[in-house]
Amino acid sequence: MTILNFPATSNLPIHRVSFPLTRRATEFDEDRLVTQPADATLVQRTLAGNRAAFDVLIRRYQRQAVAVSYRLLGSSQDALEITQDAFLRAFVNLGSLKKPEAFGGWLMRIVSNLSLNFRRGRKSRSQLPLDDLLASSNKTSANGHSVGKLAIGYVDPAHQLESAEMGRHLRKALRQLPDRQRSAIILFAIEQMPQRQVAQTLGCSVEAVKWHVFQGRKRLRESLKDYL
Amino acid sequence: MLCEELDFLLMQYLDGSLPSERRAAVRNILDSHPEARTRLRSYQRLDDVFRSKGPMPSIHWEELAKRISAAVTLQRS
């Protein structure tokens, strides 16, 4: 094992300290701000028979669900179907959700599990075809990955090409990771979800999330070293 | 300090999940050890890749919400 000559000071305990969670801004925060009320209220209203309340949850979380599934599967069509299936399962099983305020993490857990099961070949089809929802500007690359346009504003074509190229390398490297590490990296480092929500999603502790992210980053740094 | 320990510490420093006194300790290490700075930069570049993360598909979100809602209604009935 490689050892570097750094001071192993006693005031730097590595494993025993509880760290304050940092809440990182995500693209989904804006949606949350403008679409009150809170998740817990919407869950309770849905359970009381208010169907429109669940529609708010759909709009609030569909982007995150598609993004997570897309990162796990590398296919936009599959991600759309997984997202629809996940919301269906969430709706059917909503009564079993013990902490309504944790709806987001719970839903992402369903999305992650469905996506990983899908990868393992246990695919279950959704009820409605969704491929027409992909914007017409999407193109499919030679290796089968969808490479839709970037979302906002003008993008330098060279940068776009570089980004797509790096995206391919990243997807390939991610595929080499064990499921737990891949999911942790996608949820925390790529989709910028808070560690606590990642822990809820993966059904593990925050400390375990840190460890999976740590191990995943180490492997990815090695896999991508020629491009960093 | 083992590479593994240092890397774990650097990643938490990068994520902003270290308390202030531990951040200060990491800064001291970074100030005095070029190799630690190199390792930190490599993880920063990796995070840049994560943030660029390749393009997402363009999706008609409003229509997707309607489809999912319709599927839920179908399921309900």
Image (spheres, coloured by chain):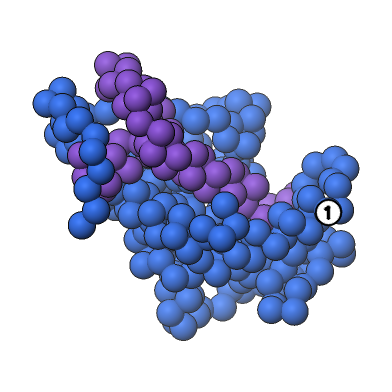
Chain colours: A blue, B purple
In-image side of A225 versus A7 (left or right): right
Can residue A150 be seen from the camera position used here? yes
- Name the chain letter of the residue that bears numbered label 1: A
Q: Name the residue under label 1.
A: A158
Q: Name the element at disc 1.
A: helix
Q: In which quarter of the image is residue A169?
A: bottom right
The residue under the point 51% across, 66% down is A173
Indicate whether A29 appears above or below A190.
Answer: above
Q: Nearer the viewer, residue A76 or B18?
A: B18
The residue under the point 51% across, 58% down is A225
Q: Position of residue A115 (x, y in %)?
A: 48, 67
Indicate whether A101 appears above or below B59.
Answer: above
Can residue B69 be seen from the camera position used here? no
In-image side of A56 versus A202 (left or right): right
In-image side of B76 versus A10 (left or right): right
Please state, as top left, top right, bottom left or bottom right, where the N terminus of chain A lies in the image: bottom left
**What residue type is disc 1 on?**
Ala
Within 10 angstroms of label 1, few (less than 14), some, or many (20 or more) residues?
few
Q: Where is residue A192 in the image (x, y as percent from the top left)?
A: 51, 41
Q: Nearer the viewer, residue A73 or A118?
A: A73
Residue, far bottom: A121
Q: How many marks?
A: 1
The residue under the point 64% across, 60% down is A167
Q: Where is residue A102 in the image (x, y as percent from the top left)?
A: 39, 40
The residue under the point 55% across, 69% down is A172
Q: Position of residue A191 (x, y in %)?
A: 54, 46
